[in-house]
Image (cartoon, grey):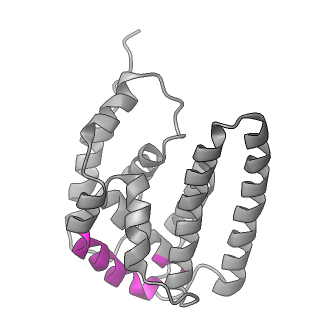
Amino acid sequence: IVFYIKCLLLTAEKHKSNKISWFQDNEVALERISGDIKIMREYFETLTDCTPYLATVVENGFTLLTTIHELMCIAAGLSDSDEGDFIPILHKEIQDVNITKHMVGDLWHLVHPTQERQVWDLVGSLEQRLAAVCPPDISAVRMVRDRMTVPGIRLDEMMAKLYIDSKRKRPVKAGAVESMVNNWKMTWSVEEPNE
């Protein structure tokens, strides 16, 4: 699931137009993404028969993917849902308001780039609500550094590192992204062990 999300975000990174969608036809692309989610879900649900404790993990992962898909449908004008209802669900998994802003902005950048700035501002206006849903917790980052982890399987870590390395210009106030990146660099820096 993290790999699939990373692929979407890397595609947004490659997309240079601020006027047209990355996809030739948003509706077809989003139907394909929906099909991908269905196939992956069916596969992982077969694994829960052998390993029942995976059921919760699978359900949480696919809630995240379907939330991302719904946000993209909203951005493309293919859903009447309100993005304000889905952004907190996404934020609950990401747990960092600035990373949530980046991700939602990237989803809009893929399907409706002319509205990226507006959705960035919307996420900014929801900051207090997002903090209430999931208060900032630096202990989660410390936990990642304090124990052995497999690089790239934590969503928040993958996203922070991707955005630290990002070269894409975002339609936000000058200096805003640089400030966020500097904070992430301090938070997510990993010291190499001495040999």
Name the residue located 25 percent from the left edge and 67 percent from the top edge.
129
Is residue 43 visible from the viewing direction of this image?
yes
Q: Main secondary structure of the magenta part?
A: helix
Q: Nearer the viewer, residue 85 or 10?
A: 85
User: Residue 169 is drawn in which quadrant?
Assistant: bottom left
The answer to whether 159 is drawn above or below residue 63 in the figure is above
Point 35% across, 79% down: residue: 119
Residue 51, image x, y percentages: 72, 34
Q: Is residue 123 magenta?
A: yes
Q: Residue 163 appears at what percent x and percent y?
A: 40, 55
14 up-or-down from 185: above or below: below
Q: Can residue 25 be seen at all in this image of the molecule?
A: no
Give the x, y percent position of residue 157.
Answer: 42, 43
Q: Would residue 121 be found to the left or right of residue 52 on screen? A: left
| Quadrant occupied by the C terminus | top left
Q: Is residue 178 in the magenta section?
A: no
- Counting labels gives 0
Q: Quick one: which residue is furthest to the top in this view?
A: 195
The magenta region covers: 108-126
Vertical position of residue 171 compared to residue 163: above or below: below
Return the x and y of residue 116 as percentages of the image width and height.
39, 80
Instruction: Quadrant for residue 21, please give it.
Output: bottom right
Q: Is residue 117 left or right of residue 20?
A: left
Front position in the image: 47 or 77 = 47
Given residues 41 and 177, the one toward you in this image is: 41
Front position in the image: 67 or 160: 67
Q: Residue at x 64, y 84 (%)?
A: 26
